[in-house]
């Protein structure tokens, strides 16, 4: 029976509690059943991401591939749909899917990610060009981000009232204005939804391929905001944070062929969300302690730097 990594087991238990424990108890059997059904032979040790396990396999039809099984969560529902929509254009190819078990057989990419590239401009340029390729007309059935706009605005206003924070009123107002002005009238374009350098892998068929999409439909500039937020570790080391932040915006917008102002506004929205989330829950890389405080304060600073002159009326 397939053995799961201890780190993955513990993080799932910490995050999901009893539901996670029940799923983990069934997971080895699910993996073994899928291996047999799909004619997969294990070809390496079990790896894992935040919410799923990845097992390198071999199949007669494709040769090298990976079997991925994710925790059953609404946020993972449309991952295979995004891969179907892209059909291998800028993303790994989907070979098999079992939606009941949140399982897929996918094209195998290399284990190294874009996050390992030291040149920051190269990271952002590669991501921008890939974002442009992924931004295709959306099929029906995917989650429209505009459907989340009301919940986004409600949460921003609740966080403003309920949390102790240092965000000026105009900064929160700018995020609310983005939801009202950009969040509801969004285009029908596929967006990745969790677009950062660790979700972009080196590959053989193409130099870089995207993995782990949420499969949303909306403004491609939304992914630019996600990417900038994920650049926090590199930006923390910048001598001039403001200059470094605006460099990311410039390079990404040009590479992705997007309006820079829309990217800035979505990035500001993501930063405000991250600051409030950090105060309520901490972060995956820092649930508590000094690093949680550091990252939360950095998100607040980033949100202020990204706030433009027009701030909206707020909550």
Image (spheres, rainbow, N blue to C red):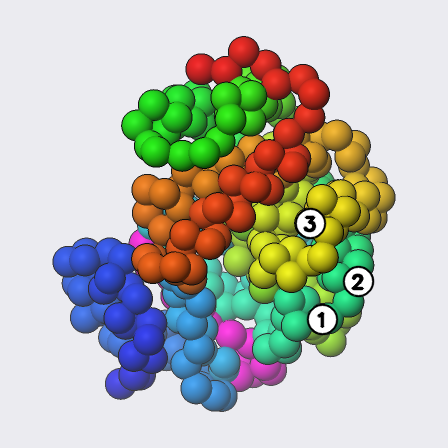
Disc 1 to disc 2, C-alpha distance: 8 Å
Q: For this view, does 9 lie left or right of residue 278?
A: left
Looking at the rendered image, the disc whose residue lies closer to the viewer, 3 or 2, is 3
Q: Is residue 79 above or below residue 158?
A: below
Disc 3 residue crowd, few under 14, some 14–19, many 20+, Cα 10 Å? some
Q: Say if residue 269 shows up in the picture.
A: yes
Quadrant in which the N terminus is drawn:
bottom left
Any magenta on residue 217? no
Which residue lies at the image location 71% right of the left edge and 41% below the top edge? 136
Residue 49 in percent (x, y) is at 44, 67
Look at the image and give the residue range highlighted in magenta. 58-72
**Callouts 3 and 2 close, C-beta under 8 Å:** no
Write down the residue under mark 1.
Answer: 117
Residue 86 in percent (x, y) is at 66, 51
For residue 276, which quarter of the picture? top left
Q: For this view, does 262 lie left or right of residue 31?
A: right
Quadrant in which the C terminus is drawn:
top left
Write down the residue under mark 3.
Answer: 241
Q: Secondary structure at mark 3?
A: helix
Write down the residue under mark 2.
Answer: 122
**Magenta segment, principal secondary structure?**
strand
Which residue lies at the image location 71% right of the left edge and 44% below the top edge? 242
**Callouts 1 and 2 close, C-beta under 8 Å:** yes
């Amino acid at each position: 029976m397939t053995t799961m990594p201890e780190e993955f087991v513990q993080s799932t238990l910490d995050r999901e509690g009893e539901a996670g424990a029940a799923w983990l108890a069934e997971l080895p059997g699910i993996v073994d059943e899928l291996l047999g059904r799909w004619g997969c032979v294990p070809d390496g040790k079990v790896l894992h991401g935040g919410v799923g396990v990845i097992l390198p396999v071999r199949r007669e039809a494709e040769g090298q591939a990976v079997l991925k099984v994710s925790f059953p969560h609404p946020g993972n529902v449309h991952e295979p749909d995004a891969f179907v929509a892209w059909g291998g254009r800028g993303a790994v190819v989907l070979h098999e899917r079992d939606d009941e078990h949140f399982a897929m057989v996918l094209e195998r990419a290399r284990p190294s990610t874009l996050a390992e590239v030291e040149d920051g401009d190269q990271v952002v340029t590669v991501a921008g060009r890939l974002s442009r390729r992924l931004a295709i007309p959306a099929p029906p059935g995917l989650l429209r981000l505009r459907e989340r706009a009301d919940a986004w605005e409600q949460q921003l206003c609740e966080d403003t009232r309920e949390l102790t924070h240092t965000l000026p009123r105009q900064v929160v107002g700018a995020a609310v204005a983005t939801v009202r002005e950009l969040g509801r009238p969004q285009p029908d374009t596929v967006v990745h939804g969790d677009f950062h350098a660790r979700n972009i892998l080196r590959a053989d068929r193409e130099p870089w391929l995207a993995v782990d999409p949420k499969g949303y439909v909306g403004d491609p500039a939304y992914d630019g905001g996600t990417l900038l937020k994920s650049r926090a570790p590199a930006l923390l080391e910048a001598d001039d944070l403001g200059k470094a932040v605006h460099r990311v915006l410039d390079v990404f917008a040009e590479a992705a062929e997007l309006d820079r102002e829309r990217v800035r506004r979505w990035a500001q929205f993501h930063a405000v969300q991250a600051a409030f989330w950090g105060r309520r829950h901490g972060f995956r890389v820092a649930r508590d302690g000094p690093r949680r405080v550091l990252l939360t304060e950095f998100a607040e600073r980033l949100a202020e730097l990204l706030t433009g002159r027009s701030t909206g009326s707020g909550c």
